[in-house]
Image: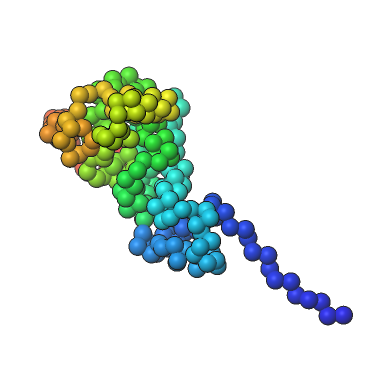
Amino acid sequence: MTQQLQAPRRTPLNRDRVLQAAVALADAGGFESLSMRRLAEELGVVPMALYKHVANKEELLDGMVAILIGEIDPPVPGADWKNAVRLRVLSARRALQRHPWARRAVESRTNKTPAVLGYMDSFTGMFLAGGFTADLTHHVMHAIGGRMWGFTQELFDDPEAPPAEQSPQAQAAMFEQLAARYPNIVAIATSKIHDEGSVIGHGCDDQFEFEFALDLLLDGFERLHDQGWSSGQARLERR
């Protein structure tokens, strides 16, 4: 009796499988290689099948960034704020180095997703927990910029600022919702009177933030100079 060969069962498509395949595709070919059509080919499905799990490429990239964030170590319990921040940044850098596409993806996210806001809230929380005021943390975050993601870039926008056309009542309701979910972000975002004409981020004073970061760097340079610092000695001390 001839036995009929059964076709192998295809692994069901779901959102996680789509996102993981997108990460693998971008890891192999870079940010530019990622397209919905190419991803569908990798998964052995028609492109329309992907849209049941991600609405468009922007949502796909949001999901990929969420995967990246999931690979970054959480704050180390019991560590002082300086070590906690340093370890977090180095963990983010390692995640970024594993995924060369990640910097482009992070920089392309104009709308802050819950995963991104959660990471930013946790990051600012390390300074607040270390005794920093909301005012100082506001400027510290400007100085850190993209280093919180493991790379350097220009300053990023203040998170989730309400659109100017919203009524005062709608703005108040939005901030109330944000404050309940992302208290650390809202604390620093509302800690200063802002400059509405800023090009750095919604309402932040360009010149002040630039000088704050510059002075911070210069103070560090001065300290190292006074110590007689050299890169060779620093490398020896790190071994």
Identify the residue at the far bottom of this view: 2
In percent of the image, x 32 and y 50: which residue is there? 108
Residue 238 is left or right of residue 6, and the answer is left
In percent of the image, x 19 and y 28: which residue is there? 194
Identify the residue at the far right of this view: 1
Tally the marks.
0
Residue 112 quadrant: top left
Name the spot of residue 49 as percent of width and height, x first: 54, 61
Residue 196 is left or right of residue 28, and the answer is left
Q: Does any portion of residue 75 appear in the rendered image?
A: yes
Residue 185 quadrant: top left
Name the spot of residue 32 as percent of width and height, x first: 35, 62
Residue 55 is left or right of residue 136, and the answer is right
Name the spot of residue 233 as percent of width and height, x first: 23, 40
Q: Could you say which is closer to the camera, residue 146 or residue 65?
A: 65
Name the spot of residue 107 as percent of width and height, x first: 30, 48
Examine the rendered structure and indicate whether residue 149 appears above or below residue 134. Answer: below
Q: Does any portion of residue 126 appear in the rendered image?
A: no
Quadrant location of the N terminus in the rendered image: bottom right
Examine the rendered structure and indicate whether residue 88 appears above or below residue 17. Answer: above
Q: Could you say which is closer to the camera, residue 77 or residue 142?
A: 142
Q: Could you say which is closer to the camera, residue 130 or residue 12?
A: 12
Residue 222 quadrant: top left
In percent of the image, x 16 and y 30: which residue is there? 195
Colouring style: rainbow
In percent of the image, x 39 and y 47: which residue is there? 94
Examine the rendered structure and indicate whether residue 2 appears above or below residue 201. Answer: below
